[in-house]
Image (spheres, rainbow, N blue to C red):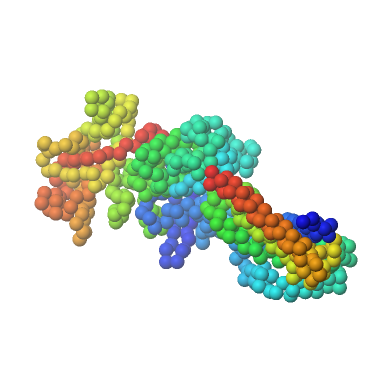
Amino acid sequence: MIEVDVSLAQGAFTVEAAFTGGAGITALFGPSGSGKTTLIHLIAGLRRPDRGRVRVDGRDLVDTGAGLFVPPHRRRIGLVFQDAQLFPHLTVRQNLLYGRAFAPRAERRIDLSPVVDALGIGHLLGRRPATLSGGERQRVAFGRALLASPRLLLMDEPLASLDGARKAEVLPLIERLRDGFGIPIVYVSHAVEEVARLAATVVVLREGRVAAAGPPNVVLHGAATGAGGRFEVASVLEGAAGPADEAYLLTPVAHPAGTVWLTGRVGPPGRRLRVVIRGTDVALSRRPPEGLTIRTVLSGTVSSIASGDGPLAIVEVVLAGGDGLAAVVTRKAVDDLGLAPGAGVHALVKTVALDERPLSG
Amino acid sequence: MELSDEAWTAIWLSMRIASVATLASLPFGIAVALLLARARFPGRTLVDGLVHLPLVMPPVVTGYVLLLLFGRRGPIGSFLEETFGIVLSFRWTGAALAAAVMGFPLMVRAIRLSIEAVDRRLETAAGSLGAGPAAVFFTVTLPLAVPGILTGAVLAFAKALGEFGATITFVSNIPGETRTIAAAIYTLTQTPGGDAEALALAAVATAIALAALVASELLQRRAGRVVAG
């Protein structure tokens, strides 16, 4: 359990945010400059708030009213950065065990071998950080933070410096850590797929303030209208996995509005899944489409259209079954097709990211 | 040619003085380097200037200041003698002090640069893992600064080995007590027929300095390998 209510002025920019997070992952989500990293620094104790308090596990770490400020090394909060920040003069094993030596004996809940197994780094123990790949380093960094048996883990864009393939490798590991070691995690990211996939609670930040907070399928739906970048409109749908099509290596996900096709085998059949759909990957058609390569077609009704003077508009669609889906289309298309609230549409979805988190978790 | 007993005495004395000067000043050098690299306090520029003073002042002046301060009638010298029975003036220990003071700016400079080069985010990481400031220093900052500390020590040792002006002013040129290689060479050049031995001693001094440089290079390469993996 983490409770944060802080404000800090830095020049013209003020961070003024309050949120609480429970078990599992609490994601701080927002465009660059929205104050995510400042919040992480305030929780870790690397910066002092002008006003406010930070509580972790019922223990006050900062309370400006009472003049309380626990220094970083007494907070027992683990940090994982964008680059792994391993100690270059120590071996992987020494890096992993570094924090353990400082943890009070009674609080050393986490042992080396389960961490090494969960992260698959047993073969690296004797090596030095300089000889590791980026993905390997990040795994060791996760392990090092865990082995200090922290009360809370802060992860500041831990995947940002990894390429797509490495990301796909490390994401499941974060899930394994989340589920296997029971340490609450605050996770900073501006990648919607990561957040939708990992988080139990999403705190959306904009210009230093909390714009929205709640479960990902509620908060992320059409949450973001940031200008460009990786911070985009996205929707989260839930459905049940069907048996994989072995001939084409596809897995259907049954949704009341239609079948969502995922690439690869996603099992087991019957499992409830959460899928993430970017607004820019959605096209709309007034008629049932024919002769298209797109396999995922969902039917629904336009509920609202947001547009300004720019070329793009965000069309909100209520799908059969009640889930919302946001589509980013050109304003011209809205006019040409005569789209308006109440219009029936078919949403064509090009690519879908999978959120593998069990929905009960 | 055969070196005389006096020459050998001067060589061993020089080695002893330079070693003691380097080792005794190293903790202070690291502390001052850390202070200058990291701390922000009023008077920091003054400390920086004081540390560098021996580098720019005539060595004779440094020696004279040492004599005024650490001489038996000087404020620090008389205190040391009355309280601890330590006498520095005209003793080899005084020569070590003079050598340490002269080598100090070089030592501090090298160590400070290497501390400044340590990635502070590593220290942040260590803190998040529960290490307090002292533990961070001894387990992260200091090990990563080892190459610079070695460089600083070798520079100070070489400087101490060759120190002449401050030493001869502070502790004079007493055979067997304060006559170092440099003082011995000077004495020989002032003595009729001493040229040959002066040349031999000069060769020895050069050889020792070169050996120190090579040793530090090897050590640093090893330390660099450790840090770079």
Quarter of the image containing the C terminus of chain B? top right
Residue A77: image x %, image y %?
A: 54, 46
Figure check: B158 above or below A219: below
The residue lying at 56 percent from left, 54 percent from top is B118
Count of numbered circles in the view: 0
Q: Quadrant of the N terminus of chain B?
A: bottom right
Q: Quadrant of residue B160?
A: bottom right
Please name whichever residue, B197 or A126, is drawn nearer the observer in this view of the structure.
Answer: B197
Left or right of B62 on screen, residue A50: left
Left or right of residue B82: residue A192: left
**What residue is drawn where x is 19% and y is 40%?**
A348
| Residue A16 visible in image | yes
Q: Is residue A344 left or right of residue B158?
A: left
Q: Is residue B9 above or below residue A113?
A: below
* Whether residue B170 is visible: no
Residue B123: x and y, percent?
56, 52
Closer to the camera, B111 or B176?
B176
* Residue B19: percent from left, percent from top: 74, 56
The structure residue drawn at horizontal position 37% and vertical position 43%, both measured from the top left corner, is A163
Which one is nearer the viewer's eye here, A115 or B102? B102
**Is residue B127 found left or right of B157 in the rendered image?**
left
- Residue A295, percent from left and from top: 19, 35
Question: In percent of the image, x 17 and y 49: which residue is there?
Answer: A341
